[in-house]
Amino acid sequence: MGKYFGTDGFRGEANLTLNYEHAIKIGRFIGWHFGAREGRKAKVVIGKDTRRSSYMFEYALCTGLMASGADAYIMHVTTTPSVSYIARADDFDCGIMISASHNPYYDNGIKIVNGYGEKMDEETLLKIEDYIDGKCEVPLAERAEIGRTVDYVAGRNRYIGYLISLSSFSFKDVKVGLDCANGASWSIAKGVFDALGAKTYVMNAEPDGYNINTDCGSTHIEHLQKFVVENGLDIGFAYDGDADRCLCVDEKGNVVTGDHIIYICGLYMKEKGLLANNKVVTTVMSNFGLYKALDAVGIEYEKTKVGDKYVYENMVANGHRIGGEQSGHIIFTKYANTGDGILTSLKLMEVMLDKEKPMSELAAPVVFYPQVLKNVRVKSKPEAQNDPDVQAAVAKVAEELGDTGRILVRESGTEPVIRVMVEAGTGEICEKYVDSVIDVITQKGHLE
C-alpha cells in the first residue's frame, strides 16, 4: 500500500483526508499517462455513488482529465462493478469509481481500474502519488487537445442488460427483497430483478446524499432479516453503498454470509463440472466452519490475505473461478473482474431455482464456529508478532485445538495493532486461548 492508495483506492473523509485538489491531480495524471504521454487522447469512464461529495469529486476528476487532454465519459450514479465491466467491454483506457463503499456518507474514495476492469497496478498508483506530492510535472493540454465530457448513461444501461443476460432462469413468482443501502444499486437492482420476473420488494432505495449505508444495507443486515420475515419473502439480498458486495437472507430470516455463498456456489459449480481446479479462494478470515463444510464435500481451498484484491490476484494466477470474503465480496472470474453484489445475488438465485431448494437448506451445511477477536495495541507490530515466546504461545494453542478450531494472529494494515483471533467449539474456549496469547504479548512488554 502507498501513501494515499490502499487496497481499495484512496479513501477518507471528504475534504479532509481526501479533497477536491487530490481529485483534480488524479485526473490530471491519468489523462496524461494514458493519453498525451503516448501521443493520443485517453478515454476514461467515471461512475459515482450517492454521497453528496461524489458530485464534487466527479467534476474535479473531469476537470483534471480534460486539462490533460482526456475525454471523460460520465456514467453518473452507478455501481463499482458496472464501471469495471464498461471499462473492459467498451474499450476504455481505464475507469474511475467515486465511492467509499460501506463507509458513512461523509467519507468518500477514488478507485481506479485498468482497461481490463481490474484494480490499477501498484506501479501506476505510486506514480500518481508522486504527482500529488509534487515530485513530477504533467503538461497541460492546449487548443484542440483539451478534452471533453461525454454523457454515458448508456454504459449503465449496457451493464444492466449484461446482468439480465446472465440468468438462464425465470424468477417468475419468486418474492425477492432488496436492500439497496440508499446507494448505487438503487437505480439498477430492482430493474434487473423485475426484468427477470421476480416479485420485487425494495427497501432503502431513496438516497438523499446523506443516508447511504446509514442503518441499512449489508452492514445492517438485521433490517432485511425483519423485512423478509414480515413480508413472507422467499429470499433477500443486501448490498453496500457501491454494490460490490452482497449478503443474503434466507426465507427464515437467517443471514447467509460470504462464506456461505462461496460454499453454495462452489458446490453447485463442482456438481456442474465448472469448478476449475476443484478449488475456491478465501481469505484468512473465513470461518473455520466453511473449511469443515468444504472438506466434507471434497472441495479444496486457497487462503489469501484480507482484501478482495488478494483474492482476485490468486484467482487469476491459478485459474480459479470463484473466491471472496465473508463480508460478501464474491468474485466470479468467468463473468467479472471484481466483486459484484448484484451478480452474486443472481448466481444464488440460479442455484436455488435449479436445485429447487430453499436457501436455508442450501446454506445449512456451513455451521459457523464461535469466534473471538481482540485487538492489541503494540509498540512494534513486527517485533510483537515475531517474538519467539509469542510464536510459541500461538503454536501451543494451535496444537491444543487440533482440528476442532484454529488461531490466527495478524498485523493490522492501518493501525499499530496485532489482531488475535480464535475459532473453537464454544465462546469460552475462544476467550481462554485468545487471552493466553495476549498475556504473553503483555508480559514481553510489547504493549504500546
Image: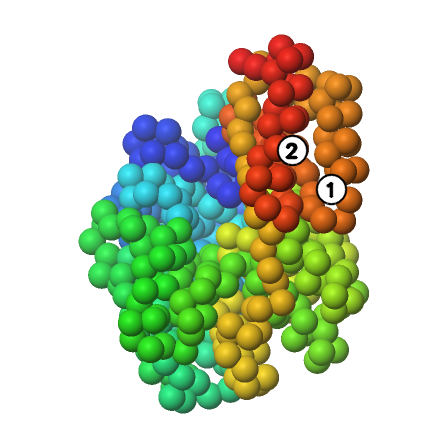
Q: Amino acid under label 1? A: Leu
Q: Residue visible at 46% across and 88% down?
A: 170
Q: What element carries label 2?
A: helix
Q: Which of 206 and 237 is in front in this view?
A: 237
For the residues labelled 1 and 2, say whether their Cβ atoms are less than 8 Å apart: yes
Q: Residue visible at 70% across and 58% down?
A: 292
Whichever of labels 1 and 2 marks the residue nearer the N terminus, that label is 1
Q: Distance between the residues labelled 1 and 2?
A: 9 Å
Q: Which of 234 and 21 is in front in this view?
A: 234
Q: Is mark 1 on a helix, strand or loop?
A: helix
Horizontal placement of 251 versus 278: left or right? Answer: left
- The residue that label 1 is drawn on is 401
Residue 168 percent across, percent down from the top left: 54, 85
Q: Up-down: is 154 above or below 246?
A: below
Horizontal placement of 268 versus 298: left or right? Answer: left
| Badge number at residue 362 | none
Q: Residue visible at 38% across and 57% down?
A: 221
Residue 108 percent across, percent down from the top left: 36, 41
Q: Nearer the viewer, residue 139 or 258?
A: 258
How many residues crowd mark 2 within 10 Å: few (<14), some (14–19), many (20+)? many
One can see residue 173 in this view: yes
Q: Amino acid under label 2? A: Tyr
One can see residue 142 in this view: no
Horizontal placement of 309 versus 407: left or right? Answer: left
Number of numbered discs? 2
- The residue that label 2 is drawn on is 433
Residue 171 percent across, percent down from the top left: 43, 85
How many residues crowd mark 1 within 10 Å: few (<14), some (14–19), many (20+)? some
Quadrant of the snapshot with the N terminus: top right
Q: Up-down: is 443 above or below 283?
A: above
Residue 47 percent across, percent down from the top left: 38, 55
Q: Up-down: is 93 above or below 28?
A: below
